[in-house]
Image (spheres, grey):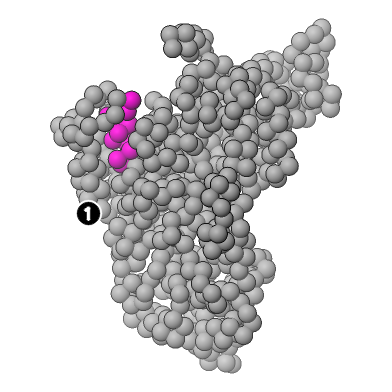
Amino acid sequence: MRFLFRRVVLLILLPIAYSFSPSLPPSLSSSLLQLSPSYVSSLSPSISSFSSSLSPTSTRRCFTSLSAFNDLSTGISNAFKSLAPLTKLTPSNLAPAMKEIRESLIESDVNVQVADDLLEAVKAKAVGMEVTPNVKPDQFFVKVMYDELTTLLGGSPSDTPTFTPPTQRLSQGPGLTTVLMAGLQGAGKTTACAKLAKYLMEDEVSWEAVDSMPEKELSETLSTRLPKSRRRVLLAACDVHRPAAREQLAVLCGRIGADLYSELEGEEGSALSIATGAQKAALEGGYDALIVDTAGRQVVNAELMSELVSVSEKLRPAETLLVLDSLTGQDAATTTLAFSAAVDVTGAILTKTDGDSKGGAAVSVYAVSGKPVKFVGTGEGVDDFDAFYPKRAAGEILGMGDVVSLVEKASKEVSDADAERMAKKMKEGVFDFDDFLQQASLVSKMGSLAGVAKMIPGVGGQISASQLSGATSRLRKSEAMIGSMTAKERRSPSLLLEGREARSRLDRIARGSGNTYDDALGFMSEFSKMRTMMARMQRQMGEGEPEKAMASGDTQAMAAGVGNRSMRRKAKKNKKSG
C-alpha cells in the first residue's frame, strides 16, 4: 500500500510541476518530479542513501505544515551554497558557512547557547572525517547537520520518520490516562485541549497493536492505515478565571463530538473540585482519557503555580503537557523550565506554527528544558493538529522536504480503491483531462497548492508570493478550460491535440472559459508534455516499482521531458555516456 500511494503522489506532482514551470528554473521544475529518491533516502540512515536525494536544488527549503521554519530554512540553505565547490571540509573553509548558519539560528530566535552547542557538535563530526567516494563533502556536512538537528529536536538519527519516536508519544497504559494541560494565557490552551481530544479519538496510533503486527505487514502499511487507539475522551473545564472559558470548551466539544465535565459546586466551585469530580466521572464512565483544561495567566506567578500544583498532586496525571505559543521564540524554553520546576511536565504542544513565528521555540525547547515537543498546532481548525516528528522537522529546516507527510496527506484524501485505479492508469501510461481535474482537486483537499508544493524537495524555498499567485491563477485557468470541454474531449485528449477539428475545438473551449486561444493552445502543449512524462516514467519503472528505477539516481531520464532544450540534450548526452 505504501508503494501504491507513492505512485499516487507522483501523479499529483504532474499538474503542480506545470503550474509552476513558467516561473521556476527548468532544473527546479524537474526536481518536482524527483520525489521517490528523496522518500527512499529519508527512510535510510546510511550516508550513501542519504546523498542520493541531494540534487543541486535539494538543499533548499520545502515541506511541511510548519511555516515557522521558513526563514530559518532559507538562511541555512543559503549557507550551504558556499560548501558546494569544496573537496574537503576544514575549519577554515567551513567558517563562513558556520557563521551564516549561526546568524540564521539567532535571527530565528534560537537560544544562543543552543545554537553554539549545535554548531560545535556539527563541526566536531564534519571536519576531517573521511567520506565515501560517492558522497560530496557538502552532502556529508548536510547529513551531519541533519543528525544533530534531529537530536536537538528530541529525536534520534536512527528514528524512522514514518512513526513518532517513543518520547513523543502519549501514555497508552491500561485504564484511565489523565492529561493535565498547562500554559500561559493566550497560547491557545483551550483550543489545544479540543484538538488533542479529537486526535486521541480519531488519529492516534495504537502502539500496542502495532507491536503485535508482523514486520512485513508493518513495513507495507502507511502510518495513516495503522490501527488506531480510538480512545473515549472526557474533557474537564477547570479554568474558572477566564470569562467564557468553559463556554468555549463546550462549543469545541460539541464540534468534535466529545463529552465535557464542567459541574460546579454552585458559584464557589474551584479548579480542584472540578478536576476531582471529572476524574471520578471518567473512571465511573469507563473513559480512556481525561483532558483537564486549567487556567492560564499573562505571566508565570505564584497563584497560577499554586493552583496547578494542587490539581496535579490530586490527579497524579500520566501526562502534563505545556501549551506554548511558538511566536514567543526561545522564551518558550524559559517558560517550560519555570513550569517544570513546579509540576512534572512531560512534554509540550507548540501552537500557531502556521503564523509568523521563526522556529526558535521548536529548536530551543528540548535543548534547554529536556522536555520533548509532542504535538504541533498548524492552524485554527480542530483538525489542524499533528504529532511532532523531530526527523521530519530537521528535514524541513534543511530544505529536504517532507515526502512522508505528503504521502500521508494523500492517503487521507484518497480511498484505497481510487488509489488502485490511479496507480493502474499510471502503469498503463494513461492520463486524460479528468485525471488532471481530479489531481488538482486532490491538491486542494490536501491543503493548498502552496502547502503541497512546500513539501517537495527543492521547491518551497524557491517559491515567492508572486510565483505562487501566478501558479494558482494558472491552475484555475486550466480547470476552467477543462470545464468547458465536452465529456468526450476530457476522456480523449487526442481530439484537442491532433486532427482538423482540434483548432475549432480549442477556440470554443477558450471562449467558453473566458480565455484566449493562445491560453488554450499553451495548456494543450503543457498537457502533452505531462503525457510524455507519464510515458517516460512508465519506461523507467519497467515491471518493477517506480522507486527502484528512480532511487537508482537515474533522474536524468525523467528530467529529459521537462524544461528547455539544453536540459534535454544534456540528459540525453549523459544517458549515452553512461
In this image, 487 relative to 312: left or right? right
Name the residue rendered at 39%, 35% in the picture: 50
Q: Position of residue 175 (x, y in %)?
A: 55, 77
Q: Position of residue 486 (x, y in %)?
A: 84, 25
Q: Is residue 113 above or below residue 301?
A: above
Identify the main secondary structure in magenta. helix
Q: Is residue 483 above or below residue 347?
A: above
Q: Which residues are magenta?
A: 134-145
Asked which quadrant contains residue 325, the reply is: bottom left
Q: How many marks?
A: 1
Asked which quadrant contains residue 526, the reply is: top right
Q: Is residue 193 above or below residue 284?
A: above
Name the residue rendered at 37%, 38% in the picture: 46
| Residue assigned mark 1 | 113
Secondary structure, mark 1, is: helix
Magenta-drawn stretch contains 135: yes
Name the residue rendered at 67%, 27% in the picture: 427
> Residue type at mark 1?
Gln
Q: Position of residue 93 (x, y in %)?
A: 18, 30
Asked which quadrant contains residue 327, the reply is: bottom left
